[in-house]
Amino acid sequence: MITNFRKALSLTTALVMASSAVAFAEPSAEIIEAAKKEGMLTTIALPHDWCGYGAVIDGFKKKYPEITVNELNPDAGSADEVEAIKANKDNKGPQAPDVVDVGLAFGPQMKAEGLLQPYKVSTWDEIPAEVKDADGFWYGDYYGVMSLLVNKDLVANTPKDWSDLLKPEYAGQVALAGDPRASNQAILGVLAAGLASGAKAGKDAGEAGLKYFGELNKAGNFVPVIGKSGTLAQGATPIVVMWDYNALAAKDTLAGNPPVEVVVPASGVLAGVYVQGISAFAPHPNAAKLWMEYLYSDEGQTAWLAGYCHPARFNAMSAAGKIPADLLAKLPPAESYAKAYFPTLEEVDANKAAVTGAWDSVVGANVQ
């Protein structure tokens, strides 16, 4: 079972050195050839400004120009990805996803439902054991911490903590970056708010987070609109709760119009791990394996870091001197990550059940 990802990232140098030779492994010639013959890879839920996925996809295309990348529904949530695989079990056409990138809780769920197939990438040993399925059905890819993206043209006083958002001055300004009944990012945004109240991670924090957003909604501060850089710039959602890497990418995209600030709350600092997996019904299984090999290569991991995400192989690559200093300098202060809480899989599952099951009854805001 998954324990604390912070511990997982504290791999010993000996372990890193023992597995370093694996980092230079390449996908087999057989997989490369078979993937080229398939000629297509179908992804889903990969916005180009999420974790630097635009550059990641471009890098894959450049390396394997024989493979067309078919991108489905970039703004989908983790639950939508699950349903897309279920709905296309017998479909070998372009609407059937080959691969998924979902929240931690969804990986084991999809394995249990027979929706994933196992595959271990060449750099498997450098992915911490605590964030991967032992049989290779799913594996951690990157993580970030929950933050607030703030439109400084409309918000005079930047909130510093979750409790600040309840103040009257933030009326009609606070939004989540997804529907908390389906989006992993939004579900964990609720958990972070619950942790800030002092509740124990899991069901308790989920319920406390629901209570918090219920109060936020009752006060008129919560906006039932899925927050994005566009809605923030337009003024519909001046404050958006989202992962720090999404907030920092949005800051780059907006380029000062409007000026924004990215804040990691003083309390309830939550880290979230996402995982990769290959559909059990993938129309292009070899292209899917090649995609995974690219994502977990030095090039793919560095591209994620350039998108402000901490990649799964971060510690191993750091020990090997492969992390560019300029990329680290663009991230929030190290202390923001030092006090982050990495929930266990059990806690993530319990929170997800609490939030998705009671959002409508406790908060009553139809986010869309």
Image: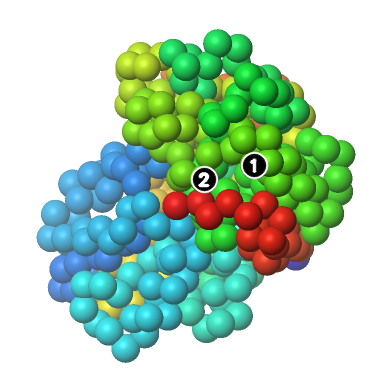
Which residue is the extreme one toward the left?
A: 66
Which residue is the extreme one toward the top?
A: 156
Tag 1: Cα neighbours inside 10 Å, few (<14), some, or many (≥20)? many
Q: Position of 166 compared to 284: left or right?
A: right
Location of mark 2 (residue) = 224
Residue at screen point 71% across, 29% down: 166
Quadrant assignment, res 139: bottom right
Task: Kindly identify the amino acid type of the residue bearing the numbered disc 2.
Answer: Pro
Quadrant assignment, res 44: bottom left
Quadrant assignment, res 162: top right
Task: Kindly identify the amino acid type of the residue bearing the numbered disc 1.
Answer: Asn
Q: Position of residue 183 (x, y in %)?
A: 52, 55
- The answer, for residue 366, to whether it is visible in the render is yes
Residue at screen point 21% across, 78% down: 93
Tag 2: Cα neighbours inside 10 Å, few (<14), some, or many (≥20)? many
Q: Position of residue 155 (x, y in %)?
A: 53, 16
Q: Position of residue 98 (x, y in %)?
A: 34, 70
In the rendered image of this protein, does residue 244 appear above or below residue 275?
A: above
Callout 2: SS: loop
In the rendered image of this protein, does residue 366 appear above or below residue 228?
A: below
In which quadrant is the N terminus drawn? Answer: bottom right
Callout 1: SS: helix
Location of mark 1 (residue) = 217
Q: Position of residue 95 (x, y in %)?
A: 26, 72
Q: Position of 347 compared to 320: left or right?
A: right
- The answer, for residue 14, to whether it is visible in the render is no
Q: Nearer the viewer, residue 269 or 118?
A: 269
Tell me the distance, in whole angstroms, between the alpha carbons under discs 1 and 2: 9 Å
